[in-house]
Image (cartoon, grey):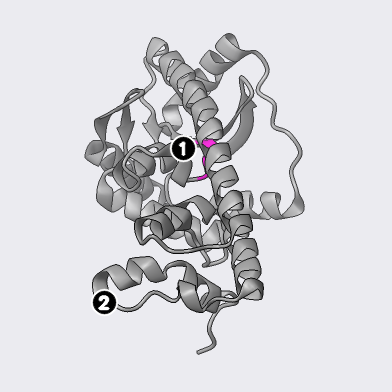
């Protein structure tokens, strides 16, 4: 079995997490300038710079000034972007509440709170992922148009079209300037099941979901087990098995 491209760099990037469990020596001191340059490019591409930087600081690791500056800039960008996304998410959730449409906020807001201790600088917040029940899709879109006006679908690449055809049950658009990824079929598995069973499983996902209080407000989120399934499928389909922590 061949290792995926970048596995060596990823092992270096995640070594602080591994060392935390194994009490192994950290490899940072053995990296030369070309290694740091390659690592910076890899981590920037995978949007991991702030996360690894936080671990380097925790271990008091000596790093090149250029690498440290790139990490700080990425962290600042994440923080500013998250603030904009969360404001947009709050407006969208308020619109859903006024329309009496239940909504699940998926992935990033919950992960920032649960995995990153509420530190928005550690995770890239690209878009707002929401889920609604199929029967609520039309009323929710109508409510969004009433609040934000035209929902701009933007340009779509060929790869985007293929991915959407595989996933099914989702719309990507900009809502009040915020990128919105709206789902009404939550997992790929259900697309290949009989419609009756699929509907029952969708309902079960909503029954297992619950409301969580965040620093910026409250919203409904997936249960831990359903979030795990969703993240795994998201990683496989949209990140070519690469994934991001």
Q: Main secondary structure of the magenta part?
A: loop
Q: Is residue 96 magenta?
A: no
Q: Position of residue 31 (x, y in %)?
A: 55, 76
State the residue in front, 30 or 137. Answer: 30
Q: Position of residue 208 (x, y in %)?
A: 23, 41
Q: Alpha-carbon neighbours of circle 1 within 10 Å: few (<14), some, or many (≥20)?
A: some
Q: Which residue is mark 2?
A: 22
Reply above or below: 65 against 210: below
Q: CA–CA distance between discs 2 and 1?
A: 42 Å
**Looking at the image, how many numbered discs can be counted on the residues?**
2
Reply above or below: 13 against 105: below
State the residue in front, 14 or 241. Answer: 14
For label 2, the SS is helix
Q: Is 17 situated left or right of 150 in this image?
A: left
Region rendered in magenta: 124-128
Residue closest to the far bottom: 1
Q: Which residue is mark 1?
A: 184
Q: Position of residue 65 (x, y in %)?
A: 60, 56
For label 1, the SS is loop
| Snapshot quadrant of residue 221 | top left
């Amino acid at each position: 079995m061949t290792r995926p491209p970048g596995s060596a760099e990823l092992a270096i990037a995640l070594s602080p997490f591994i060392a935390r469990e194994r009490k192994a020596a950290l490899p940072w001191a053995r990296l030369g300038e070309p290694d740091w340059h390659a690592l910076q490019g890899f981590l920037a591409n995978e949007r991991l710079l702030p996360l690894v930087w936080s671990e380097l600081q925790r271990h008091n690791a000596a790093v090149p000034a250029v690498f440290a500056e790139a990490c700080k800039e990425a962290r600042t960008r994440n923080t500013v972007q998250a603030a904009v996304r969360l404001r947009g998410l709050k407006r969208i959730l308020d619109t859903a509440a006024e329309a009496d449409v239940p909504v699940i906020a998926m992935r990033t807001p919950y992960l920032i709170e649960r995995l990153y201790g509420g530190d928005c600088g550690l995770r890239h917040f690209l878009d707002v992922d929401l889920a609604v029940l199929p029967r609520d899709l039309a009323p929710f879109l109508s409510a969004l148009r009433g609040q934000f006006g035209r929902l701009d679908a933007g340009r779509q690449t060929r790869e985007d079209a293929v991915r959407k055809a595989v996933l099914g049950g989702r719309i990507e658009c900009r809502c009040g300037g915020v990128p919105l990824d709206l789902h009404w079929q939550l997992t790929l598995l259900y697309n290949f099941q009989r419609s009756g069973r699929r509907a029952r499983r969708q309902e079960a996902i909503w029954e297992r979901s619950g409301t969580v209080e965040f620093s910026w407000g409250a919203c409904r989120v997936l249960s831990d087990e359903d979030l795990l399934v969703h993240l795994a499928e998201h990683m496989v389909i949209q990140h070519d098995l690469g994934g991001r922590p």
